[in-house]
Amino acid sequence: MNPELLAFATTARECAMQMMLNAAYIQRELSTLEMPGDIRGKIESLCESLIGNKHDIMTELFELQESATTSGAGSNSSRVHRIIECLADARGVIDGVVRPLQAMAGGNFELFGTFLLVSESAINILSACGAAEDAADSLGGAWEGQL
């Protein structure tokens, strides 16, 4: 595997692990906070989505590693593309929960702790996503044409 592809795979793996670790942290802490059931359901759904994205990214990374040793760059670029799509999906799901939660927490002190829990974890995940996307950019335009 070339150094740029290895750097991408490493940062994407770290991002996937951040998704898993932060989703597990939110799930663990969520039971200690009071909130309406619909908000709890959205946050639980966010966690499930992040864990699912983690599994999808890890599967693609495994296949990327396999294809990097057995086939050409075309196969690699489609796998990089799918990983980037998983990152974009995670960003969208996070945004769909954090923004409304922020708006609700602004007028409701009881939800502020929930907002902090979710937003701190979101920052960790989004930072890791940004690093993986930057690493993908260093691969050049091979995968970008497929977006």
Image: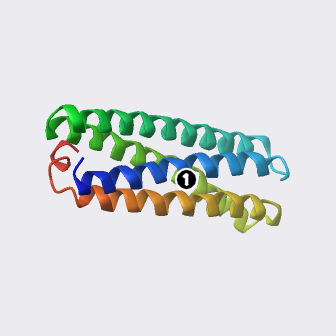
Camera-side residue of 50 and 60 = 60
Q: Residue at x 40, y 61 (%)?
A: 130
Q: Circle 1 sits on which residue?
A: 18
Q: Which image quarter holds the C terminus?
A: top left
Three-letter code, disc 1: Gln
Q: Horizontal and vertical percent for residue 56?
A: 44, 35
Camera-side residue of 93 and 140 = 140
Does 13 sit left or right of 24 as displayed? left
In the figure, residue 74 lies in which quadrant? Answer: top left
Does 94 sit left or right of 79 as displayed? right
Task: Determine the secondary structure under disc 1.
Answer: helix
89 up-or-down from 103: above or below: above
Does 51 sit left or right of 66 as displayed? right
26 up-or-down from 135: above or below: above
Q: Residue at x 28, y 38 (%)?
A: 79
Q: Horizontal and vertical percent for residue 140?
A: 17, 57
How many other residues sit within 10 Å of disc 1, few (<14), some (14-19) or many (≥20)? many
